[in-house]
Image (tube, helix red, strand yellow):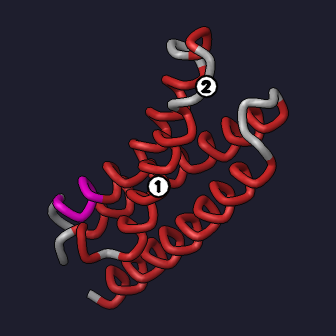
Amino acid sequence: MMPHEEVEGWKVAHRMALEVYRVTEAWPRSERYELTSQIRRAALSIPSNIAEGLARHGPRELRRYLNISRGSLAELSYFLLFARDRGLLQQAEWAALDSLRAEVGRLTWGLLRAVARADSTD
């Protein structure tokens, strides 16, 4: 498998995690151990699971880690919506992050399908 730094899905997920960290820096201190911590963990889980899956041996393990990454992406999606509705994220910030989230979802799903196709032909 190729290094994770060369995988487009990982690149966009990494960019999204950096952006989540940037926007949450301005959140109230009262959220530090609650939503800020949870949203950051979910955002970091996505690229880290893609990287770990790519480093593992075989398509079955890669699929497993990509599915974990997709679960974290769904969790992040809700956290972003919640933060927007609580007034922690401005509409423009939410839209930018949601756009990145959607792109990561498409790329991760595409990678998952490609791995499944390759595995079925082996």
> Where does the magenta region start and end?
51-55
- Lower sequence index among marks 1 and 2: 2
81 shown above or below 115: above
Front in this rendered view, residue 32 or 38: 32
Circle 1 residue: 67
Q: Tag 1: residue type?
A: Asn
Query: Measuring 53% from the left and 65% from the top, which residue is drawn there?
Result: 104
Can residue 14 be seen in this snapshot?
A: yes
Query: Measuring 59% from the left and 63% from the top, which residue is drawn there?
Result: 100
Q: Tag 2: residue type?
A: Trp
35 shown above or below 102: above
* Whole-number angstrom distance, CA of label 1 to CA of label 2: 30 Å
* Image coords of residue 38 (percent x, y): 53, 26
Circle 2 residue: 27
Query: Measuring 63% from the left and 47% from the top, which residue is drawn there?
Result: 74
Query: Measuring 42% from the left and 49% from the top, which residue is drawn there?
Result: 18
